[in-house]
Image: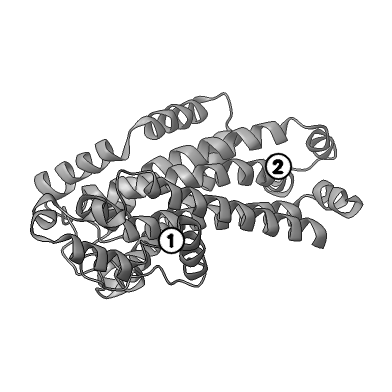
Amino acid sequence: MFAAIARRISLSFLILILVSLFVFLATEVLPGDALDVSLTDDDLAVLTPEQLAEMRAELGLDRPAAVRYLSWLSGALVGDFGNTIITRAPVADIIMGPLRNSILLALATTAVAIPVAHFIGILAAYWRDRAPDTIVSTSAIVGYSIPEFVSGNALILIFAIWLPIFPATIVLYTDGPILEMLAVSILPVATIVIGSIAYLSRLLRLGLVEALVSDYVERARLAGVSEWRVVFTHAVPASLVPTLNAAALYVAGLLSGIVVVEKVFAYPGLGLELINAVLKREVPVVQATVFLGAVGVLLMNLLADLSIIALDPRVRRSAGRG
């Protein structure tokens, strides 16, 4: 078991290194260098070649690409992403507030989506092939098919314009108080929750239905165990492993949805910071936000893998033989 955990952690670290290399090379292949990309035509018109050379030396752009990558990676692994090109402000200071806000948004979404999705998925599986199951399955397909951009603007139209209950956009500063940030984040959370509940409830329903027709569940029924006890005692634990596998794959899509939601509601999170950095052509900020997004995906997948190892005896036995 410990060998399997070590392998999963080592693999995640290797993937992180490969992702960091991809992030770095993605900006290297752009025409010019990071300074050329960040400066506007007006800036380039007033700067002399000597000034540009001095700025490149200050940014370390005169060094070989391999040296710059190793320097950036060693800093990124400890949270030091260098300085912005224009203002020379530490990138870590710029993204710390947005990172906190995106984590708050993800945690609030998870706190709502997981319990509700489990409740709906269990009800649909219990009444499978009947009216409640049909309603839940159809609603899940529709909810998961609606892009966050559409559902977010629909919620703004209904609850911020027609029924002015919630604010349409977030007007707090990036480092605003956590409780105030959560209080005005109801619509962004609801937008992400719609798709998350739709996906997770359908996923759990499929896992439960498969478990409910298994041989050991049938034996439990023959032994006189009630159907609700069969569902909660036997089917739900058996469905957790495949559900975790699929939910881990959903994380990457969820992050892209968060970026869209932050743009729609002007939510001061990491996704909005990424969009602003692209528009401002601040390459170090773009590199840092993409790298942190990759770290988030890898951590969630690693957590899912470790949970599967802990929950599935077959995986533990296989790990022990390995």
Residue 240: image x %, image y %?
66, 46
Which residue occupies the foreground of this view, 254 or 233? Answer: 254
Residue 311 in the image: state x and y as whole percent. Answer: 74, 53
- Foreground residue, 167 or 96? 96
Does residue 136 appear in this view? yes
Left/right of residue 106 with respect to residue 123 in the rendered view: left
Which circle marks residue 107 in the picture?
1
Residue furthest to the front in view is 50
Provide the secondary structure element on which disc 1 rests.
helix
**Relative image position of residue 121 (x, y in whole percent):** 54, 40
Mark 2 — residue? 235
Query: For residue 292, which quarter of the picture?
Result: bottom left
State the scheme by which the image is colored.
one colour
Lower sequence index among marks 2 and 1: 1
Judge by depth and name the residue closer to the eye, 24 or 51: 51
CA distance separating discs 2 and 1:
27 Å
> Does residue 97 appear anywhere in the picture?
no
